[in-house]
Image (cartoon, rainbow, N blue to C red):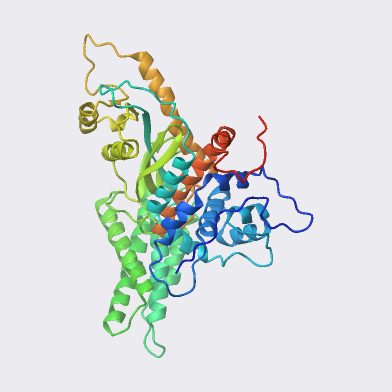
């Protein structure tokens, strides 16, 4: 059940204790004015179909807490304390008066907030914020063949690394072996013969490898083979116990399925002398995380979700998002069509990497009068001279998407996703994009307030030019 709250109050009406005077120029006060809380609340209230039970936390409190967490990187426990102690954060979260007598909610509620605010909902919220704070479009390029096309869209893909231990085959097998030993202990009935696990010997063999400073390839392979044999024996013991009528909890069954999959993958790579396998599992706690080959200096492979973003007029939008590795060139047409749905026309040009310039994308762009930046496919023609000036301008303007990604990873928690579930991890990535756009709006705040001063008439302060 959800109950609507009253509309946004001004900072002057915010209840303050005697002697406390909040600054109207505080950034959280300004950010609160940028967000259309009432429109977002209508979208959020639709998630609650039932009219019975305890009322849910207000949208402004849930969304505000998630935005603050994405801004500072606080833990779930710390975010409740920060809101309890700061009057500015309380105003941003919709409090009517300052109250530090109790936390705003239990820290475990943050998990439910993240599950409810899905990437689709956050995408709608992002559009609402950008539409409310819409400024004049300064992109008037019309270098496409179709005169109705206008605007420039910059696209790129990146990886949002998840917080997992760097995967190594021996470490992964050791964790799987320990988990199977715990399952065997749980299924064992006192008074019966307990299956042998050789856990001390197995751990001793594992330590012999990890304590070696620079183990050779033969030593690593030998250690992996031993761990595979120990793990196979434990899995057979668990199967025998299950056939005897013993049962596992749903969480333990899911854990066992993951361990069996890890054993099959590691056994295949061991037998075939290879280091790659489809849908390779790199973490037992987050089995959906996949290795993403990026080819960047210092980080050739990252482990997390891969995402596409598009930048138009300096503002970022999230495109395709998946934990599986994919070719970003296949999502360009979808991104262009979304641009057309928002604006009513196609962009005049699309600035992208060379990987986007395949034949399908080039034919699609040519058909709709869109110029896709980059060199032509195949061998250069003999009498054709490339437009070096235009290529240089495109490359310089394409840097904007790299700047947006760098800022999102350094300041908006896109560089390390600490959520442990797929839904919550996708929420953190989408929320990083929303917070990134709010930071962009803060830079153009004076012009924005001059343009929308009548809309936000409850602010009675002047802007220092």
The extreme bottom residue here reads: 191
Q: Could you tell me if residue 363 is visible in this image?
A: yes
Left or right of residue 427, residue 336 in this image: left
User: Where is 193 relative to 342, above or below?
Assistant: below
The residue lying at 65 percent from left, 52 percent from top is: 88
| Residue 227 on image: x %, y % | 37, 63
- Between residues 19 and 307, which one lies in front from this camera angle? 19
Position of residue 438 relative to residue 41, above or below, is above
- Give the number of marks: 0
Q: What x and y, as percent, mark residue 90?
A: 63, 56
**Apparent side of residue 31 relative to residue 226 in the rendered image (left or right):** right
> Where does the image place residue 362, in percent across and percent down from the top left?
23, 28
Is 10 placed above or below 356 here?
A: below
Q: Residue furthest top?
A: 383
Where residue 174 sits, quadrant-wise, is bottom left
Residue beneath the point at 36% across and 68% down: 255
Q: Quadrant location of residue 444?
A: top right
Task: State the quadrant of the N terminus.
Answer: bottom left
> In this rendering, is residue 31 above or below 45?
above
Viewer-closest of 85 and 235: 85
Image quadrant occupied by the C terminus: top right
Q: Residue 229, can we see it?
A: no
Residue placed most toward the observer, 356 or 255:
356
- Residue located at (39% from left, 87% from top): 189
């Amino acid at each position: 059940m959800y109950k609507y709250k009253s509309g946004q109050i001004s900072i002057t009406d915010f209840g303050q204790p005697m002697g406390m005077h909040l600054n109207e120029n505080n950034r959280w006060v300004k950010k609160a004015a940028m967000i259309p809380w009432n429109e977002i609340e209508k979208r959020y209230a639709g998630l609650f179909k039932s009219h019975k039970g305890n009322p849910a936390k207000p949208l402004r409190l849930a969304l505000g807490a998630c935005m603050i967490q994405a801004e500072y990187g606080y833990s779930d426990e710390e975010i409740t304390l920060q809101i309890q102690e700061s009057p500015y954060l309380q105003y941003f979260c919709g409090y009517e008066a300052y109250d530090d007598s109790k936390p705003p909610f239990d820290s475990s509620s943050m998990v439910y907030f993240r599950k409810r605010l899905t990437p689709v909902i956050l995408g709608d919220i992002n559009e609402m914020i950008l539409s409310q704070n819409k400024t004049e479009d300064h992109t008037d390029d019309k270098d496409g063949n179709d005169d109705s096309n206008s605007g420039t869209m910059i696209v790129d893909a990146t990886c949002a690394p998840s917080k997992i231990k760097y995967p190594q085959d021996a470490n992964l097998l050791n964790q799987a072996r320990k988990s199977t030993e715990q399952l065997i202990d749980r299924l064992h009935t006192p008074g019966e013969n307990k299956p042998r696990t050789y856990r001390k010997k197995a751990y001793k063999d594992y330590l012999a490898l990890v304590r070696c400073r620079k183990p050779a390839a033969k030593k690593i392979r030998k250690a992996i083979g031993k761990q595979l044999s120990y793990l196979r024996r434990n899995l057979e013991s668990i199967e025998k116990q299950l056939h005897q009528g013993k049962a596992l909890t749903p969480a333990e069954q899911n854990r066992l399925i993951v361990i069996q999959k890890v054993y099959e993958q590691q056994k295949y790579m061991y037998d075939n002398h290879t280091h790659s396998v489809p849908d390779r599992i790199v973490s037992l706690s987050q089995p959906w995380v996949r290795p993403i080959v990026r080819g960047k200096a210092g980080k050739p492979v990252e482990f997390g979700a891969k995402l596409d973003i598009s930048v138009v007029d300096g503002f970022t939008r999230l495109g395709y998002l998946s934990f599986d590795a994919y070719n970003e060139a296949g999502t360009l047409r979808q991104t262009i069509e979304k641009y057309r749905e928002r604006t009513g026309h196609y962009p005049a040009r699309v600035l992208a990497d060379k990987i986007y310039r395949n034949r399908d994308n080039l034919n699609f762009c040519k058909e709709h009068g869109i110029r896709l930046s980059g060199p032509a496919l195949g061998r250069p023609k003999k009498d054709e001279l490339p437009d070096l000036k235009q290529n240089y301008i495109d490359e310089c303007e394409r840097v904007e998407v790299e700047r947006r990604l760098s800022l999102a990873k350094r300041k908006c928690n896109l560089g390390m996703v600490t959520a442990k579930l797929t839904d919550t991890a996708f929420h953190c990535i989408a929320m990083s994009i929303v917070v990134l756009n709010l930071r962009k709006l803060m830079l153009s705040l004076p012009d924005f307030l001059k343009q929308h001063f009548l809309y936000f008439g409850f602010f009675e302060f002047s802007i220092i030019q």
